[in-house]
Amino acid sequence: MSEHAEHAEHAEAHDHPTNSYFIWTALVLALFTALETSTYWIDFGSFATPLLLILMTIKFFVILLVFMHLKYDSKLFGAMFYIGLGLALGVYTAALCTFQFFVK
Amino acid sequence: MADTTIHAPGHGTTTGLSNNKLAMWMFLGSECLLFGGLISTYMLYRGRHEGGPGPAQVFDIPLTSVSSFVLLMSSLTMVLAVNAAKAKDDRNTKLWLTVTALLGSLFVGGQVYEFTAFYKEGLGFTTSLFSSSFFTLTGFHGVHVSIGVMMLLALVAIISRGRITGDKAEAVEMIGLYWHFVDVVWVVIFTLVYLIPA
């Protein structure tokens, strides 16, 4: 059996998270969403944008790693996704720089 | 004699992984490029609303926050459906898939209401560069959610009729991956489009 296949079987053998684990994760995500929304009513000043970007990134990866099981699955699945994500971030950051988006 | 043993997904592939699942992850990776392009275009044009209302005049943050919460909860019900499918519990699988489809429909309904309200306030598709890029981005996302709802309902019907030929849990998981991706994209849209001021 190839080393790759052994890794895959090892990943499959991991215990699947329980429903209560997913419910707690969803509650944390809901709390983060409430915090994000609060920036509309509460003035966080210059901290608002960095706070929103940090919360967005945390929510993005929690859904990806927990709900989409990337944390428990084979690394090859993650690689397929991260290649696309990395390519998109690189290409469109370059495009936005070309249009001087970050210096306006 | 024909081999009638039911193998786990991925058994017999060179990687030991399910090729269907690998293809789904590749597809989702390519979707990042699609939504990346649409989000970047919106970011470039969000300030270009001469002759029409801008984001600050039309956005209804409380409504969009409720929609975001609904979509987030649909991710929870989807993952509960996947867990039920893995436990071979057909009744709960169908229940959670149906609840997910209902929450998705509620989100799409909220988007239709939002678009109608914007149109009545004078923001049409061709009003400004802001409106065109906004409707294209959120419209594409709405279409993805609608396709997801159709796939969920089709899956419920297929499970009810017992017509899944392969691994049932993997079929539910594949639709689940697509659904969670749609939620992940909305997490980004909600922050960059609605919450961070232009």
Image (cartoon, coloured by chain):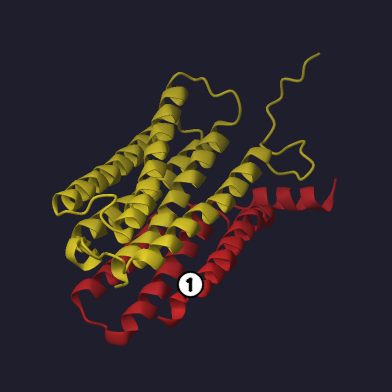
- In percent of width and height, residue B168 lies at 55, 31
Amino acid marked by disc 1: Phe
In front of the other: A43 or B155: A43
The structure residue drawn at horizontal position 65% and vertical position 45%, both measured from the top left corner, is B22
For chain B, give the colour.
Answer: yellow
The answer to whether residue A60 is left or right of residue A12 is left
The answer to whether residue B40 is left or right of residue A48 is right
For disc 1, the chain is: A
- In percent of width and height, residue A85 lies at 57, 60
How many residues crowd mark 1 within 10 Å: few (<14), some (14–19), many (20+)?
A: few
Residue A24 seen in the figure: no
Image height of B160 relative to B180, above or below: above
Work out which residue is located at the far bottom of the displayed protein and give it.
Answer: A46
In front of the other: B44 or A3: B44
Work out which residue is located at the far left of the displayed protein and give it.
Answer: B120
State the quadrant of the C terminus of chain B: bottom left
The structure residue drawn at horizontal position 44% and vertical position 33%, both measured from the top left corner, is B151
The answer to whether residue A26 is left or right of residue A5 is left
The structure residue drawn at horizontal position 44% and vertical position 82%, both measured from the top left corner, is A103
Q: Secondary structure at mark 1?
A: loop
* Residue identifier under label 1: A99
Q: State the image quarter where residue B165 is shown.
A: top right
- In percent of width and height, residue A31 lies at 31, 66
Q: Which chain appears red?
A: A
Image height of B186 relative to A12, above or below: below
